[in-house]
Image (tube, rainbow, N blue to C red):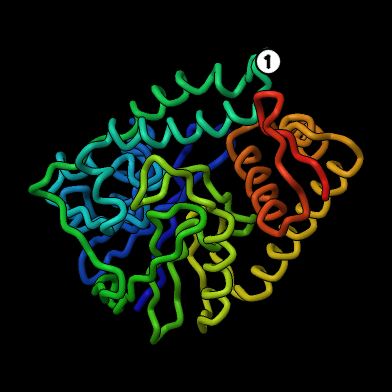
Amino acid sequence: MKQPIRIELPMLQPKMSVNAYLFLEPEPVLIDCGMNTAETFELLKAELQKHGKSLADLAHVYITHAHIDHMGMAGRLAQETEAIIWVNPYTLPWTKDLAVQWQKRANIIESVLIKETPPDWENPMLSNMQSFFQQALACWSAVPSDKLKVYEVGEVLPFGGGEWEVLYVPGHSNTQTCFYERARKWLFSADMLLPLTPTPAIEMKVDAPDEREISIVRLLESFERMKRLEIEMVFPGHGEPFDNHRQLIDVQLSRIQLRKAECLTVIQKGKSSFFDIFQQIYPRAFNIFTLSMLKGYLDLLEIEESIQIDNTKGYRRYLAN
């Protein structure tokens, strides 16, 4: 079995990219497919042509999770090729009711930010969010039902000359699966294992979409599961493939603990609002990724009872115990 071909595709965020992976044998197969943009479509087409294939030859597309940079192009590929789009049960609703699911996710993010914001303060993330969501939706296409199939957690998928076990690994996203080839000890890790610490995204629970998932807890659980796997090569959703996955996980776990301790120190020094804490931890990086990371650190401190929450002023204030 040959290693997959890594294809770097653009994201909405400048200077960031997402990986799709291409197997040519025994038939052309993609793992994830990027956003629905003209640039992404041309890059995928050019990569296939480079290897003597065309998009018409594409047989299957396996989607790891329901984020725009990993599956936005799926619907267009289904419409313009004969490829079958494969998703897990947690991602399936995003192929059928995209606008509804997107609004549910937006509602969860907005509800979190509103609770963190003083009533008389205009949250810049809230004011820009709706335009960002509209921009993102334009890069995400629904998948026709006749071109769609569902793979189950624990199922073994035959592609690329291997037998890939489906692993459910929530944390970055609670729709996320990885594909593990036990014989070769290869892992398509999606956004579970990355060169940088995965973001515990602010999103809803799969079984209670009006409630927020405490994503960082699921992330830590999934890290421990990944450490138990024998892996010789990781093919991540972002960045270059790597080995030594346990060493990387240990580094990222240490980083999470360090950041959590920094947050507690900031709170102990008198900073009590989310955005005051944010300015101390991420002074030059105001975006949804860093907001999600900080929310995760504060979740851990609250669970550990290192802090308490005060809502008497109409928003969440974090006080050290």
Judge by depth and name the residue closer to the eye, 285 or 207.
Answer: 207
Judge by depth and name the residue closer to the eye, 274 or 32.
Answer: 274
Q: Label 1: how many residues lie within 10 Å, few (<14), some (14-19) or many (20+)?
A: few
Please determine whether, in this image, residue 106 is positioned above or below residue 170: above
Residue bearing mark 1: 121
Residue at image position (59%, 74%) is 243
Please determine whether, in this image, residue 289 is positioned above or below residue 231: above
Judge by depth and name the residue closer to the eye, 49 or 40.
Answer: 40
Left or right position of 275 against 244: right
Residue at image position (30%, 78%) is 162
Left or right position of 6 against 141: right
Please determine whether, in this image, residue 110 is positioned above or below residue 246: above
Q: Quadrant of the N terminus?
A: bottom left
Residue 250 image offset from top left, x and y in percent? 70, 71
Please determine whether, in this image, residue 58 is positioned above or below residue 313: below
Residue 49 image offset from top left, x and y in percent? 28, 50
Answer yes or no: is residue 280 visible. Answer: yes
Left or right position of 115 against 118: left
Answer yes or no: is residue 52 visible. Answer: no
Q: How many marks?
A: 1
Residue at image position (51%, 61%) is 192
Residue 282 image offset from top left, x and y in percent? 76, 37
Residue 112 image offset from top left, x and y in percent? 55, 34
